[in-house]
Image (cartoon, coloured by chain):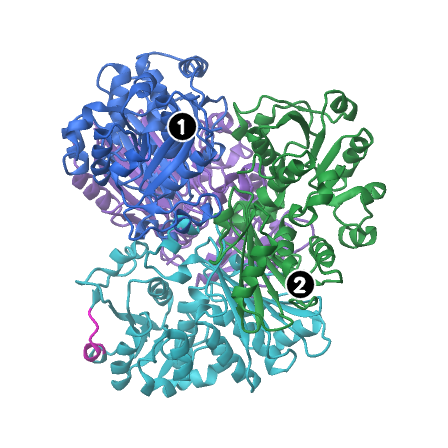
Chain colours: A purple, B green, C cyan, D blue
Amino acid sequence: MTKIAILGGSGYTAVELIKIVLRHPKAKIEAITSRQEGTPAIAELHPSLLDRIDLRCEPFDPDALKKRGVQCAFGCLPHGVSAESVKPLLERGIRVVDLSADYRLRDPKVFEAYYGEPPHDVANLSKAVYGLPELYGEQIESAQLVANPGCYPQTAILGLAPLVANKLIELKGIIVNSCSGVSGAGRTPKLTTHFPECNESVSAYNVGKHRHTPEIEQALTDAAGEPVEVLFVPHLVPMDRGIFSTIYATPTSEVTEAELTKLLREYYSKAPFVRVRDTLPATKDTAHTNYLDLCVKVARGKIVILACEDNLIRGASGVAVQNFNRMFGYEETMGLV
Amino acid sequence: MTKIAILGGSGYTAVELIKIVLRHPKAKIEAITSRQEGTPAIAELHPSLLDRIDLRCEPFDPDALKKRGVQCAFGCLPHGVSAESVKPLLERGIRVVDLSADYRLRDPKVFEAYYGEPPHDVANLSKAVYGLPELYGEQIESAQLVANPGCYPQTAILGLAPLVANKLIELKGIIVNSCSGVSGAGRTPKLTTHFPECNESVSAYNVGKHRHTPEIEQALTDAAGEPVEVLFVPHLVPMDRGIFSTIYATPTSEVTEAELTKLLREYYSKAPFVRVRDTLPATKDTAHTNYLDLCVKVARGKIVILACEDNLIRGASGVAVQNFNRMFGYEETMGLV
Amino acid sequence: MTKIAILGGSGYTAVELIKIVLRHPKAKIEAITSRQEGTPAIAELHPSLLDRIDLRCEPFDPDALKKRGVQCAFGCLPHGVSAESVKPLLERGIRVVDLSADYRLRDPKVFEAYYGEPPHDVANLSKAVYGLPELYGEQIESAQLVANPGCYPQTAILGLAPLVANKLIELKGIIVNSCSGVSGAGRTPKLTTHFPECNESVSAYNVGKHRHTPEIEQALTDAAGEPVEVLFVPHLVPMDRGIFSTIYATPTSEVTEAELTKLLREYYSKAPFVRVRDTLPATKDTAHTNYLDLCVKVARGKIVILACEDNLIRGASGVAVQNFNRMFGYEETMGLV
Amino acid sequence: MTKIAILGGSGYTAVELIKIVLRHPKAKIEAITSRQEGTPAIAELHPSLLDRIDLRCEPFDPDALKKRGVQCAFGCLPHGVSAESVKPLLERGIRVVDLSADYRLRDPKVFEAYYGEPPHDVANLSKAVYGLPELYGEQIESAQLVANPGCYPQTAILGLAPLVANKLIELKGIIVNSCSGVSGAGRTPKLTTHFPECNESVSAYNVGKHRHTPEIEQALTDAAGEPVEVLFVPHLVPMDRGIFSTIYATPTSEVTEAELTKLLREYYSKAPFVRVRDTLPATKDTAHTNYLDLCVKVARGKIVILACEDNLIRGASGVAVQNFNRMFGYEETMGLV
């Protein structure tokens, strides 16, 4: 049994994480911290947890967490804030899965270009392993610090990695057109996520400059062994959860759907949560699960990859537990199926 | 042609009002005021108005409005704030349709009991006519100040008025169970109206103590000639617009659906926007219109009235224009069909 | 380990049941039958099951099920059809949890009045136990045949049972006003459940004559020891899942919210899936869980009970597994938390 | 005043058309035909029309329509069926706006390749003018037969026409990624449009082979004067109405957003319903209007055009009336603003 702590209990990734861990036979929630005033019961912040967990939120105290035997902390805080908690935990030998963006990008200049400020903990950047288990699984196993991946990037990276790794597509000019449910925007009310504004509407945002762009490129460049460049255009669609990415790439030579499907199947033959499908996927097929569905088509001289997932589970808290399982030697699917 | 002003341009009732007036052959928007800083184009606040109206918001200046020939102002401000604008307009002889709650309740003590503070303009309360044209049509014609009715109350009042007026139901123990789309909560983002919180969910709020309760009772007491008491329970449902009220009353003597339907038809024979139906209504049948649909059933010893409307049109801006039409001698349906 | 069969694999209750049983440590799906042509993989009918279950649907063959060691069958077929499968299974000593309405009503005349035809298996009616574990738990333990309760009735019955059992409310004139998500209508496409028809709309249906009415009355009459009568009005609201019932009753003597809340808490002190709350519930708090949330208010001389649940889990497949657990001596919450 | 007929009254384009024509000061609905049995009141098929129109559906009789003075018929029937009605009307000198696909593609072989059968009325193909007023306005004015454009194609064609006409982008490799609300699928219930299937889900369909592909290419080839090729990928998103197209093209030489925006503004300077915006559009901004919003971005070496509209108004019935206005010499915006 591994004692874990959750840092920042008030948001959507925290509540999903709690629900997963409650089902996990080898993990136990020892503490949930919050920057909120007082020590509200976590079930007060998230009524869906009533009668399911008895903990109250507590202020962040790394020494106390250490003393109480916490071995792993999950950071569910916003970037910037998160690094401030991660640092003292690492110093005390507590391993961390950080769901924020603070440790995802290796190059501080790239971080600064997209986030408008330098990373908050440059010193620990080199310790961080990018938490995409299908690509960085071995490194994750021994990592002290796992930078849990962004929601959008996982669809793009897992959809494209087998193709760039095998040089089947041109590495420039890749287009990632994504649609996300509204929970991806977090739990803080804003006009753009006010129900009567975003319901019954589709819109694009951050066209070509979303912060997940460099994350996609970093991982695909790793996979390709040379620079990959993507144009990423996210859209907001009126649903709670789910990301659907439609990815357009130019093949370097003629290839069939059957060949590509076979390649993807082989590439992910040991990945329990990647489902390579013959049929077109729908986000609903993956809702409330840790599965990421892929389908590949060839049309009009382009390769089209359809990729979808639940942005809160596979896109955040589910993959965090998948990483945790690898870090602590548990079955990769434990608590997740 | 009548020049009108709209006070408070940033909310949902304002944008709906603008769209209606743009189609109205006899009304012209002379000014839109806003408490926002600067003078933003109204189409900047509401992109749906792009290319449709060229006005910029301006600070409230009653003398300027008078000088520019404004004859009618529509108050789209929150209660409390609204009265502060209405007062100087009335002093200058500008007629007002106030969409806030400031002038709806005749008894200041009842207002205070439900709103937690006394009315902001007691002096003008006696001038105000409750703006439900089907019941107070004649008084509205000559009114200086019309207190536009609340969204929920219209369904309850129009559903019950013919029955209480004819003493067909007991006047105590009436239950009004209502469901509203989220736009009824206004345009200010809150956690309860944050998309991922209220989407895919139904909840009740303000059980038995919603501020629309005394408004329903006041109008029904007028219709009955003796005190009427209702238990009003509103619910939030995941849609943009629409109110559906299911009203339960106890008949004073045996009566059939056919008799009740006939009574309602006669009662509203001259009301162009009340549709008494033989089939069960759906809010979608009334969406984006000024119609209010009614259907009456008898079951298990109770009379059940189903009433629905679009909360932003019939429930606010549409009925405001219906009132305006009566006040200025235009055809009641002008701009509304 | 208990081998189970699922009869009728193509609908929503079947797919939810499969997902629950896949997590249940003591139940194993031995067979899934279907009336569809051929033997489609169950994951073909429900793509969300891809890579999670490998079974194909098979034709119904009670002897084969018996031979293969099936000890419990879950009927996910429409009423009428279901009884035809239940009969031969009971004859072979296979216990059944039937999710259809075929065995819910003890009085064949009442069934006929609401379903327009006599029950299809009158002979086994007396064997059936109504599968609401909080009220009929002991009988369920030894039952050969459990008539799994309807979705709406559970909210009404569990909300009202403590009050009628303690004679705190009048037994006539009870009103149950319910809102349901669209999955409650099943998986067969119809105009009323066609997305552009029911989305962004609320409507009532079967006012006062819905088939769940006698089911509510039968169970409450059991609890009260004398006849209870309810007026039940269901509504369709635009969401996938969730039922919210607002229940109105007249107290027989003065009583406070605090007293009623305490009573409910005591009544359900041993019920792991009934959550008596101090705060107003929302269907989303119960989504994808087997919890049923209750809250009680007193207003304007009425008792108002707010009750909600997930109609597919608590309202169907979850409570079916809860019944199964009791029947086979497993922990009541197994597979469900 | 021009008398019009509507062929096929039961679908969504018909009901939207009726609502527009009811507001049109110069058009009068003389007849609505239906293939349904009997002569149901049109308000029975569409309860939103109650009290707004008194007509009953009638069988199609071209001689009677001619005799009653019908000058224009709007075809709201499925392709194939539509041509059978259009033929006899043209023979009798009644002008037609056909909302089906029967006359959109000039080349019968292209039609057959995408629709699996030859066009049903080859003889009249050459008479048909493609009904996109911004590009074919003059021809529409004198046309006997207007082939009203598809919903998706309008966003793609109007977004790309100024660019291909000015040779600013490469004519191959254009990608049109579109999201549509569910009403685009029509009113016939199917599993894919059953609420619990498509709600809370995004999916792609007909990847690279949707029937609107050749329509887009035909119009853009006209605009460019040489062959244009697009890869079109449509998606279904959970909302009633609205199409959002994200269009990716490769510039032939360096160009800025400002230059492109200026070009679009000039190109559509006389088009009252095309709004070239500086801000990113949302489908909701165009909902229930005939406006089509465009915004252009340059990112990562690509031109990205964001285009959106209401699929039922601008995408079908609104543009049909816009065509009608041109055909009969009325102000282009009549009935539409």
| Left or right of residue C56, residue A95 in this image | right
Q: Which mark is residue C207?
A: none
Q: What is the chain letter for disc 1?
A: D
The residue type indicated by label 2 comes to: Asn
- Which quadrant of the structure image shows residue D116? top left
In this view, the residue farthest toward the right is B123
Query: Which mark is in front, 2 or 1?
Result: 2
Q: Residues within 10 Å of mark 1 (few under 14, many from 20)?
A: many
In this view, the residue farthest toward the front is D67
Cα–Cα gap, marks 2 and 1: 56 Å
- Nearer-the-camera pick, D34 or A145: D34
**Residue D173: % across, % down:** 26, 24
- Which quadrant of the structure image shows residue B168? bottom right
| Left or right of residue D197, residue B312 in this image | right
Say which residue label 2 marks.
Answer: B166
Say which residue label 1 marks.
Answer: D307
Q: What secondary structure is marked by label 2?
A: loop
Please determine whether, in this image, residue D162 is positioned above or below residue C184.
above
What is the span of residues highlighted in magenta in the rendered image? C59-65
The residue type indicated by label 1 comes to: Ala
- Nearer-the-camera pick, D57 or D17: D57
Q: What is the chain letter for disc 2?
A: B
Q: Is residue A157 magenta?
A: no
Please determine whether, in this image, residue B206 is positioned above or below residue B189.
below
Quarter of the image that includes the C terminus of chain A:
bottom left
- Nearer-the-camera pick, C281 or A84: C281
